[in-house]
Image (cartoon, grey):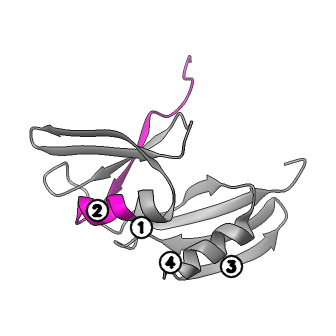
Amino acid sequence: MNITHASFVTVPVSDQDRALRFYTDVLGFEITADLQMPPGRWLQVAPKGARTVLTLSGPGMGDFTPGTTRGIMFVTTDVDTDCARLTEAGVTVDGPTDLPWGRMAGFQDPDGNGLMLLTEKEGF
C-alpha cells in the first residue's frame, strides 16, 4: 500500500452557506474549493496548512444525511481557549475532559455533525 493521506472527509450539511460561515468564522478554517459543478456546489474547507479537507456536501451532492457525521477530531494546541471561543460564539461544548491521551471536548456544527477538539498529551 502506498497511501499517504486522506484527501477529504465528507460532512453532510443542509445549508452550505450557513455551514461555510460556521467553519470559517467560528473555527477559522480556510476555503480550499468553492466550485459550481453538476450536480451542485463543491465546497471544501480546512485548517490552514492541512492536507485533509472537509467537503461540506449540500443537497444534491450525494446520498448523505446532514447531522450524521460523528468523530471528526481536530487537534489543537489549546483546547481550553478554543472551547471558550466556541462558547462565546454560542456553540454548546461538552468538556474539556482529561483523558489518558490528552484533553478533549466535543461540539456540533449547525447541522448536528459531531466534532471534537483534542490537545494531545505529550508522548501519545
Mark closer to the observer (1, 4): 4
Q: Position of residue 8 (x, y in %)?
A: 42, 39
Instruction: Please tell me which of labels 3 and 2 falls first in the chain.
Output: 2
Decide: few, some or many residues near mark 2? Use Cα within 10 Å; few <14, some 14-19, many ≥20.
Answer: many
Q: What element carries label 2?
A: loop
At 41% from the left edge and 46% from the top edge, which residue is drawn?
45
Alpha carbon separation for disc pair 2 and 4 = 19 Å
Give the left or right position of residue 21, taking residue 27 as reference. left
* Viewer-nearest residue: 1 or 31: 31
Sooner in the amino-acid sequence: mark 2 or mark 1: 2
Q: Name the residue under label 2.
A: 13
Counting residues from the start of the chain, the first of labels 3 and 1 encountered is 3
Q: Residue furthest right?
A: 123
- Asked if the stretch drawn in magenta spans residue 107, the answer is no
Tag 1 residue: 113
Q: Which mark is residue 3?
A: none
| Other-residue count near label 1 (Cα within 10 Å), few / some / many at <14 / 14–19 / ≥20 | some
Label 4 sits on what residue type? Ala
Residue ID at (64%, 63%):
117
Q: Distance between the residues labelled 3 and 2?
A: 24 Å
Near-viewer residue (65 or 97)? 97
Residue at numbered disc 3: 95
Residue 7 visible at all? yes
Residue under circle 4?
Answer: 89
* Residue closer to the observer: 66 or 84: 84
Q: Which residue is drawn at 37% across and 66% down?
A: 68
Q: Can you tell which quarter of the image residue 96 is in?
A: bottom right
Which of the two discs, 2 and 4, labels the residue nearer the N terminus?
A: 2
Residues at circles 3 and 4 in contact by the CB criterion of under 8 Å: no
The correct choice, above or below, for 30 with respect to 17 in the image is above
Report the span colored magenta: 1-21
Q: In this view, does 18 lie above or below 49?
A: below
